[in-house]
Image (spheres, rainbow, N blue to C red):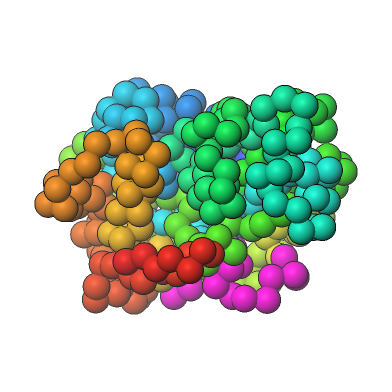
Amino acid sequence: MHNDNVRTLQLGYMPLIDCAPLVAAVRLGLDSKHGLRLRLRRQASWAAIRDKLLSGELDAVHALAGLVYGVETGIGGPQAGLAILLTLNQNGQAIVLSPPLARGLEQGLPLRELLAALPRPPILAQTFPTGTHAMWLYCWLAAQGVDPMAAIRGVTLSPPQMPAALARGELDGYCAGEPWAAQAEALGAGARVIRSGQLWPGHPEKVLACRRAFAALQPETAVALTAAVLEACRWLDVPENRRQAVDWLADPEVIGLPAERIAASLLPSDIDDPAQRLRFHADGQVNFPWRSDGRWFLHQFRRWGWLPAASPEADAILLGNVRRVDTYRQAAEQLGVPVPTRDTRQSTLFDGSRWE
């Protein structure tokens, strides 16, 4: 029977392990449970996701947290008002270097010297100029005395293209989401030198984002969408369920890599610290749109000279506009997911710096 009350939404995603909540929401029928029909649309790049979201071709997207703040501030393309409905995951990304560079690091040679010895300026790729991968890469380089704005040539590339570009010698390394570090290692094209969960244990990674007008003008639909995806995130934190999700992600229409490659990223056996593992829920700690996480991205944009200084009040207004905490609270309440009493959290990064 046709139900006229079912709202169809177009959702964009990139072929990455952390699109799993969107895939699970559809495969488990959580969309229809919440009165929605979600149509998943695989995209070729983060720029395509941004452009189609802004044009209205996509209603909501799997997005880099940093992409949202880049669009909001006008430094990641055209300025527009976006909203974060929830965080989809923490951790699950990695920095990969060519085999010679990775070997040199393993032997204890300084990265600065290894890069300086290359026959041409080092070329390192990230996936979007203001995205999380750019942030992790630049922080890691800077901590080792390499100026990411002057000592390297930074390029933007779609994650599925990175392993082959590294194998061809067009890149010296990259930062991307899994399974594209696992794929580089499987091809012998590069080696994972650090996981993002080691850089910032429990860092925000992908978010469910929409246009701010959509969240404001269709509040019930926004809550239903948030609830459907939040329920999928909770489902994904059960290990047996992840084994089921491996097959869904391996599907040629979704990521299209061998199941064992997907499993190595979704069910990694070599990460002892739970705070560094790929997490989708952790009793809601992952999903809450923390204000302090947003401040960190603005701080990085200023660190690299992309954004002028602003008053704490101006930042608070911007973060309040982006983070749809009321929408999230309503969805969490429906599902019995605990919501923190404060909207900031403390984090300790790999270099010992503390962030709140």
Q: Is residue 25 left or right of residue 330?
A: right
Q: As drawn, which residue projects farthest toward the left?
A: 313
Q: Which range of residues does the magenta coloring cover?
A: 268-283
Residue 273 is a magenta residue: yes
Q: Is residue 79 left or right of residue 60?
A: left
Residue 255: image location, x then y, percent:
68, 41
Q: Is residue 17 left or right of residue 270?
A: left
Q: Residue at x 70, y 38 (%)?
A: 115
The residue closer to the viewer here, 222 or 122, is: 122
Residue 263: image location, x then y, percent:
75, 59
Residue 123: image location, x then y, percent:
66, 30
The quadrant holding residue 92 is bottom right
Residue 77 is a magenta residue: no
Q: Is residue 116 left or right of residue 322?
A: right
> Does 173 sit above or below residue 325?
above
> Does 80 sit above or below residue 35?
above
Residue 111: image location, x then y, percent:
68, 48
